[in-house]
Image: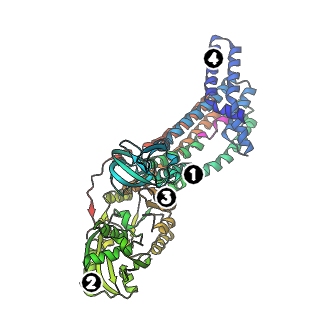
Amino acid sequence: MKMIAHINHHKNHITILSGVLIAIGFISGFLGTENLKDIALIIATLIASVPIFIKAIQALRMKAFSIDLLVSIAVLGALYIGEYTESSVVTFLFLFGDYLEMRTLEKTRSSLRELVDMAPQEATILRADGNTETIPVEEVEEGDRVVIHPGGKVPVDGKIVSGKASINEAAITGESVPASKTIDAKVFSGTIVDNGYIEIIAERVGDDTTFAKIIELVEEAQESKSKAEKFLDKFANIYTPTVVVLSIIVYLFTRDLHLAITFLVIACPGALVIGAPVSNVAGIGNGAKNGVLIKGGEIMDKFSKVDTLVFDKTGTLTKGKPEVTDIHTFNKVDKDTLLELVAKAETISEHHLGQTIVKTARKRGMDLASMELTDGEAIKGNGIKAVVNKRKIIAGNRKLMTTENITLSTAVESYAVSREKAGNSAIFIAIDGNIAGIISIADQIRDDAKKALAQMRANGIKKIVMLTGDNKHTAEAVAMELGLDEFHAELLPENKVEFVKKLKESGHIVAMAGDGINDAPAIATADIGLAMGEGGTDVSMETADVVLMADKLMQFSHAYSLSKATTRNMKQNIFIAVAVVAILLTGVLMGSVHLASGMFIHEASVLIVILNAMRLIRFNRKNMQADEEVVAVPVEA
């Protein structure tokens, strides 16, 4: 085993040595010393054959018929009939082609390598005594206070507790424009402080950081195979023994051993085997570099066939940063009292609207910690019920009010509808069984939504649908503004799942995009699940097939067009490989293609398909880097 490892380690040196010996042989032949020429070419053949024979034997042990086996048989045949020039040239070209293949494959993995190179190695910890200590990043523990100076890399995921900074998050989001961060903002491992100074509390360390998960996901994705690759693997196991049998038939018919050996070598499916994997690796690498995680070749292939898009509204088509726009009370209830009671009740909810109310109360300096909360219950898709300071609070939508027998007067209903038609979500608040007020919350449509949806329609999307738990008036405003084909409002998570299932049953290939948390069931049900996962939430990374790290719909558009380009590139490579083999075999049988020249063309075809795949590395880069001059679109009727 050590000998085999040693030979494989020095394969490049073996290639160079065999090349030098072939050159010596040709020079000797030119000078008329035929014996020296034959000796040099035989030694070159034997030396270059060793790594090829080793791989052939290893494949046979695994009951696989590899390309190396075909070349090994051909080389032995060439030596047997005294064709030393061709045996040496074939082995050299095969090794040299292998070298070029590895080099160019490594180039297609450059995006992953660049990610790995960005990984921080050290962290500066602020100790309790006020002193700082620089330690390996692996030794940072949750709760440590980490200091990052200008130009420094953020070593772990955490929350800023002191300072402010402009942070380049390209390693996570693919976005080159630095993001401004201040106290309480989340920061992620692998990002860089352009200017400013921050201190953070470590929340995720080691392999749990967002950056580490991205690298792991991209590695797994690049190793996973598309349907085309799986088919070609099976095809190669059938194709190789078939070629051996055909070469024997050629010999039986022609009695020309040289022709049979040439047929054997030229029929090697090298370009066919390498073409699909290199396209897959390059495409996934391009996505990772642009902040899009596509989880494997099979996902890429399926994504390219999608014809229907289904979107959640809040956090997907809209920015997901809602704000309280109005607090309206009834029956002489004080606004601050209403907000304080509801905010305390909403502390049990993870819903974005509830958390918006909590943030508003805290911004106004309300001391929620001093309030007593009992019997709290979050009602999925409808709202919350809780007892705060011994008062029964119910906050949510109309369904919840109806379920709890809360009467909505004409005036209350009229006010709510007017707020909803203005693009707000109306949160009904009842205290001790009576309607007490309405809190209006509004969001904004994403700046890039219109452009992204238009691009995806141009690329083949036939239908775009929005599913939301929000009220129908707000949903209609968003749908009209974006020109959606359908919208369905006031849905529970299970209703979204049912709708996605119906679309699939009617023959649509469906991609579902959501925030990766409450939309996880629908994301999992769709043919392709896509999460708007800024910072890479655990749920979005685990559930979705595609994750947009910068929460930009233009990344969605890029991912979709990239999937089509990658699938198209795979097909191009397969066509090139098959066409070259067909032409060469025809040439062999007609006597116009010989072993050495055929092998040269064969290796050239391998290089061509790799170079073709490498075009994917730079796919759409100009469009992704261009600043989008799109004005923010408010959600208005």
- N-terminal-most mark, 4 or 3: 4
Report the front residue among 527 and 520.
Answer: 520
From the image, state whether disc 3 or disc 1 is nearer to you.
3
Which mark identifies residue 296?
Answer: none
Residue 541 is labelled as 3
Badge 4: few (under 14), some or many (20 or more) residues near its Cα, within 10 Å? Answer: some
Residue at 56%, 37% (x, y): give it. 102
Which element type, helix, strand or loop, lies under badge 4? helix
Res 603 quadrant in image: top right
Q: Earlier in the sequence, mark 1 or mark 4?
A: 4
Mark 4 = which residue? 24
- Decide which of 537, 602 is in the foreground and name it: 537
Residue for point 36% across, 75% down: 371
Q: Position of residue 19 (x, y in %)?
A: 61, 23
On screen, residue 328 above or below 634: below
* Residue linked to disc 1: 224
